Image: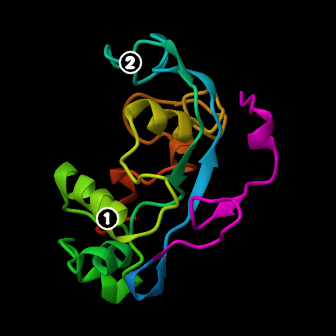
């Protein structure tokens, strides 16, 4: 069941710059990044012990997000990463021939991702905001999208092993047998 806060029930306000009155954050070369606003609120983080696929470290507990935050709507693409850093470390660069450089950047470490954020802060005018990786609490809050179900479309996981068709509605998984990042 999704009991979305009022802000989530309103039409989504997409931005490309972390200021409501501006519309665009351009990286070098005119490459844009899209961000969405996650308002403050509370949610139940983790999963109930009865949920299929529950792990022991996923104890269900309440978390409170005091202040809202901006989060990238999409994973950072190879084009975005390259435009800011001047490199593309992705191993499957051949996929550019198939689907273009709009696929997610991959084969980077956490340090490289943090360095990307630091470079954004150093080279771009973020109007007082600071780019960073989301905390685990922010990440789960944004991914849940106001839902209390296992999946962010209001459905539950249907099987512990094998294909879960509900999961296929919201995510790619290895059973999709796609040999490049999605």
Residue 49 visible at all: yes
* x then y, percent, for residue 53: 40, 24
Query: What residue did someone put label 2 on?
Result: 58
Q: Which residues are magenta?
A: 1-26
At x 18%, y 72%, the residue is 89
Question: Is 8 on the left-hand or right-hand side of 98?
Answer: right
Specify the quadrant that holds the N terminus.
Answer: top right
Q: Farthest residue toward the front? A: 128
**Disc marking residue 122:** 1
Give the quadrant of residue 39.
Answer: top right
Q: Is residue 4 magenta?
A: yes
Give the quadrant of residue 65.
Answer: top right
Residue 178 visible at all: no
Specify the quadrant that holds the C terminus.
Answer: bottom left
Viewer-proximal residue, 164 or 64? 64
Between label 1 and label 2, give the one nearer the viewer.
1
Give the quadrant of residue 117.
Answer: bottom left
| Label 1, residues with CA under 10 Å away: few <14, some 14-19, many ≥20 | few
**Disc marking residue 32:** none
């Amino acid at each position: 069941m999704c009991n979305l806060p009022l802000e989530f029930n309103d039409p989504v306000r997409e931005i490309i710059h972390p200021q409501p009155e501006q519309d665009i954050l351009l990286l070098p070369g005119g490459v844009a990044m899209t961000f969405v606003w996650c308002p403050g609120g509370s949610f139940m983080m983790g999963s109930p012990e009865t949920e299929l696929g529950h792990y022991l470290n996923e104890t269900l507990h309440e978390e409170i997000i005091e202040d809202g935050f901006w989060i990238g709507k999409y994973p950072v693409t190879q084009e975005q990463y390259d435009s800011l850093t001047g490199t593309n470390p992705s191993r499957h660069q051949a996929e550019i021939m198939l689907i273009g450089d709009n696929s997610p950047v991959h084969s980077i470490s956490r340090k490289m991702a943090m360095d990307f954020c630091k470079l954004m802060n150093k080279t771009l005018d973020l109007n007082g905001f600071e780019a960073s990786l989301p905390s685990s609490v922010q990440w789960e809050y944004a991914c849940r999208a106001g839902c209390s179900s296992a999946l962010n479309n209001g459905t539950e996981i249907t099987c512990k092993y094998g294909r879960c068709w509900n999961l296929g509605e919201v995510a790619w998984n290895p059973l999709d047998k796609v040999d490049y990042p999605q």
